[in-house]
Amino acid sequence: MPKVTKIEATINPVTHMPSFANTKRRVAGYARVSTDSDEQFTSYEAQVDYYTNYIKSRADWQFVEVYTDEGISATNTKHRDGFNKMIDDALSGKIDLIVTKSVSRFARNTVDSLVTVRKLKEKGVEVYFEKENIYTLDSKGELLITIMSSLAQEESRSISENVTWGQRKRFADGKVSMPYKCFLGYKKGEDGTPEIVPEEAKTVRRIYSMYIQGKSIGYIARQLTKEHIPSPSGKSKWASSTIQSILTNEKYKGDALLQKTFTVDFLQKKIKKNEGEIPQYYVEHSHEPIIDPREFELVQQEIARRSAIGKHYSGQSILSARIICGDCGGFYGSKVWHSTSKYKRIIWQCNETFRGKSCRTPHYDEEEIKERFLKAYNILTGDKEALLEDCRIIQNALTDTTEIDKKLVELSRESEIVSELMQKSIDENARMVQSQEDYNERYSAYEAKYDELDEKIRELKEQKKKQKMQYKAIGAFMLEIMECDKPLNAFDDKLWITTIDTVTAYHDGRLVFKFKTGAEIEA
C-alpha cells in the first residue's frame, strides 16, 4: 500500500504571502471625487484623511500612500493620473493591497475594472472594496466585481443619457450657448443669451474685412500676431485654423447651428462631427449679429472660390486669381514698378511669362482694370429688369435637382447591392474551401465597382453643393443690382467680389468680364 505524506501549504492563497511570516502587507488607499465643487472638496479631504488613519491603525499593514484623483469624472481610467500611478506602482511590486471606497469609485467601466483587477491579481496584488466588502483575491471576488461594475456602468449610462437628453431638449427649444472663454466677440449676457463685446467685435469685423479685401487666412493670422492682438483663447499667436473658424461660424451673423458634434460612446466620451447621424437645429436671429448676413454669405462664397483655386491663390489683392491670360490660361499677378520713385505703380501681367512662356497678352495698370470693370458693369445693368428676370430663371434652374437626386438614389441602391455581394463573398470564403485566387479576383472586382459608384455619388453631391453655392451667389448679385439706382462711377470692392466670376485678357488688349450670372461683357 502506497504511503501518502501531506505537505502543508506555506503560501496564503488570499495574500500570496508565506503563511508563517509576520511580514506586513504594504497597503495603499485610493480616493476620488467627481467634481471640483466646495462640497466635494470636503469629501475628498475626508477620504484622504480616513484612508491614511485607517491603514496606519492596522498593525499588520504598512502604509504606502493614498493615491488621489480630484475633480475628475470619467467612465474609463485613461485620464486618471493618480489611479494610473497607483496601478504602475502595484505592478512594479511596491503595493500588496489597495483599499478603496467602492467599485464605482474605482471604475465605472466593467471592462476597465476587470482588466485592472486581473492584472493586479496576476501580480498577487489585492483590491478591497469597503462598501461592497469585496476582496478581489477571494473566490467570490471576480463574480461580485463583474456584477457591481456592471451596475455602476449602467448608472453612468443613465446619467449620460439624461445629460444628453437635456442638451438636445435645449437645442430643440433653440437655446443658444457658446464656449465664451474661447469665443471671440461675445460674452454671456445677464439674461443668459450672447452679448457682444465691442472691442473683440472690432477684431472679428476686421478679420472679415481683410478677407474680403483679398488677404489670405495665413496673412490675417500673421498680421494679428504681429500687432499683439490676443486670440480667442488669450494666446499671443494666431493659428490659421482659428481665422478659418471665425470666418465660417454662422454665430457671427446672428444665427446658430446646434448639435454640430455629438458623443458617440458614453464610455469613451469620443466626440464626433455630426454628419447626419442625429438631428441638428438651425436657429435664425437667435442673437445680435456682429457681421451683416450678406457679408457673411459673401465670405462663404469667396472661401469656396479660393478652395477651388487652391495654391494658385496669392492673397495680394481682390483682383488676385480673377484675371486669366487668354493665351495660356494662367492667372495674372501683381507687380510693383518703380517701387522707390514717385512713379511707383501696380501693374498686372501673366504670371507664366516669368516661367518661360511667351504669352502675348499685355500688362494692365490696376486702375485701368477697375475702370473697365465699371464700364462692363454699367453695360450689364443697362436694362435692370431684364437682367433680374434672367437671374430668377437661372436660380429656378439651379434649385431643380430632381435628376441629380434620382441618380443619387439609383447609385446608392446599386452601391448597397455591391456591398452585400462583397459581404456574401467574404462569408462564403469563411464557410467553404475554395480557390483563393478566384476569391481574390471576384472580391477585387466588387471592390473596384464599389469604389467607382462611391466616386460617382461624391461627384453628384459636389455638383449639388456647387449649384446651391451658385444659387446664393446669384441671390447676392441680385441684391447688389437692386440697390444700385444709377450707373457706377467709383470702384467698389464688395461689388467686384459679389458680381465678378473671372476676367479674361486677350493679346489684342480686350478684357472680357464674366459675371456670376454667366453673362460676358467686353470692355
Image (spheres, rainbow, N blue to C red):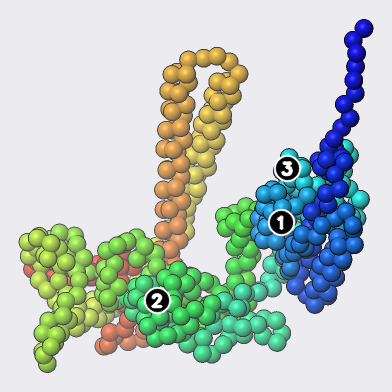
Residue designated by label 3: 123
Asked whether the viewer can see residue 307, the reply is yes
Left-right relation of 243 to 497:
right
Residue at point 34% right, 75% down? 219
- The image quadrant where one finds the C terminus is bottom left
Name the residue type under label 1. Met
- Within 10 Å of disc 2 (Cα), the crowding (few <14, some 14-19, many 20+) is many
Q: Nearer the viewer, residue 519 or 68?
A: 68
Q: Determine which quarter of the picture holds residue 324.
A: bottom left
Residue at mark 1 to residue at mark 3: CA–CA distance: 14 Å
**Element type where label 3 sits in the image:** loop
Residue at point 9% right, 71% down? 362
Left-right relation of 59 to 217:
right
Q: Determine which quarter of the picture holds residue 278.
A: bottom right
**Element type where label 1 sits in the image:** helix
Name the residue type under label 2. Ala
- Within 10 Å of disc 1 (Cα), the crowding (few <14, some 14-19, many 20+) is many
Residue designated by label 2: 221
Q: Position of residue 331 (x, y in %)?
A: 21, 65
Q: Are marks 2 and 1 in contact (CB under 8 Å)?
A: no
Q: Nearer the viewer, residue 364 or 353?
A: 353
Q: Are marks 1 and 3 in contact (CB under 8 Å)?
A: no
Residue at point 53% right, 33% down? 419
Name the residue type under label 3. Lys
- Residue found at the very far bottom of the displayed protein: 342
Q: Earlier in the sequence, mark 2 or mark 1?
A: 1
Q: Position of residue 83 (x, y in %)?
A: 71, 58
Residue designated by label 1: 86
Residue at mark 2 to residue at mark 1: CA–CA distance: 44 Å
Q: Nearer the viewer, residue 519 or 124?
A: 124
